[in-house]
Image: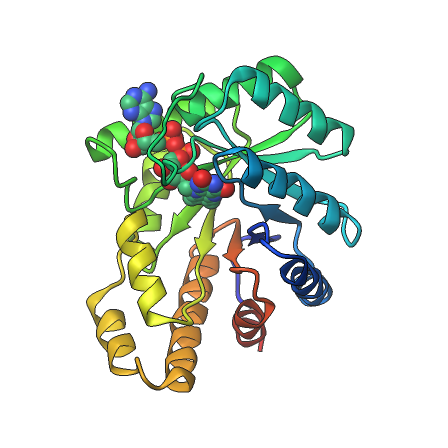
Amino acid sequence: MSSNTSNPVFSCEFFPPKTEAGMEKLLVAQKKLQSTVNPEFFSVTFGAGGSTRDRTLETVKQLQTNSANIAPHISCMGSTREQLNNVLDAYIEMDVTRLVALRGDIPEDGSTHSDLANANELVEFIREKTKNHFHIEVAAYPEYHPESASPEDDFKYFLNKVEAGADSAITQYFYNVDAYSRFMEQCARANLDIPVVPGIMPITNYASLTRFSDNCGAEIPRWIRKQLAAYENDPESLRAFGTEVVVNLCACLIKAGAPGLHFYTLNQADATLNIWNQLNS
Ligand code: FAD
């Protein structure tokens, strides 16, 4: 792989499975990714509400049996300070040393009561309680967060998270390299030099990708959307095209100096491995 960054860091994201069978499959996927990609860490998403929070903890425990560096996501949406304290205590007890700190998505039932309003307050809270125990990742949005009032405000709020103590950032996924380059230029102008690692979403399914992208504000360029729509009933061609698009994106990002890549695996090893193998061929 040609690269301007001497040591790109790779990481892979999972979500907590709902069933035991799902957990077994996830552990197999983790082993496959571990032996090929050998990521710096695996992260595990965190949903609002008690049961999903517990599932994150349980998934972290299970994944730790295969690999030491598991980074849970933690969000303040729908949580009290006491609940967050308990979660942090549990992670310290489990020897977790890296967290992805987020405000979190608004839960489906619409309840938004939280002691902390935004991710910068969560980062501050974690730093106050645990000092430098954790490496803290935060989210970045090269195509802007869907709720943001203006691009300037969105960047200002990103800076707040860094000033609160974030060590590095992972971006929402995107398919426009220019958006990431511009975001990095903004960081340079603000003298901000934490690593901002692009989040990479493999393309395997047209309907779910468009639905998810519309919700999270990631743009699918017209030429990609049109081609995916044309392959809607031809999954093999769709996957081949999707892999080619994402491999090119990854290669461009690494060439442009991205400090690594964070793969949204959706708990499936194969899509990420197809990208990885072509990127390194
Ligand atoms: P924030 O940084 O708090 O920003 C949220 C919005 O508020 C933005 O529009 C921002 O511009 C605005 N804002 C920030 N500060 C202020 C302020 N002081 N005043 C007014 N407005 C402000 N969601 C989950 O539920 N669980 C997960 O595990 C999860 N993992 C993720 C991982 C990554 C890498 C990414 C990119 C996203 C993830 N998400 C997850 C989604 C994320 O929680 C949502 O995008 C959420 O809506 C915003 O979270 P944030 O941490 O970026 O929030």
Q: Quadrant of residue 71?
A: top right
> Viewer-proximal residue, 277 or 212?
212
- Residue at the location (38% across, 85% down)? 237
Name the residue at 40% across, 82% down.
235
Q: Position of residue 79 (x, y in %)?
A: 49, 24
Quadrant for the N terminus in the image: bottom right
Tell me which residue sits at (64%, 35%) in the image: 98
Residue 84 seen in this snapshot: yes
Near-viewer residue (234 or 32): 234
Total numbered labels: 0
Above or below 218: residue 82: above
Picture coordinates of residue 124, whole percent (x, y): 51, 17
Q: As rendered, which of 152 and 29 lies closer to the eye? A: 29
Figure quarter occupied by ligand 1: top left
**Image quadrant in which you'd find residue 56:** top right
Left or right of 21 on screen, residue 45: left
Between 38 and 227, which is closer to the camera in this rendering? Answer: 227
Q: Residue at x 25, y 76 (%)?
A: 229
Give residue 141's position: percent from left, percent from top: 35, 42
Left or right: 261, with 173 as reference point: right
- Asked if residue 143 lies left or right of residue 91, the reply is left
Residue 232 spot, x, y in % from top left: 30, 80
Query: Is any atom of residue 4 visible in this view?
Result: no
Which colour style is shown? rainbow
Rendered-image quadrant of the C terminus:
bottom right
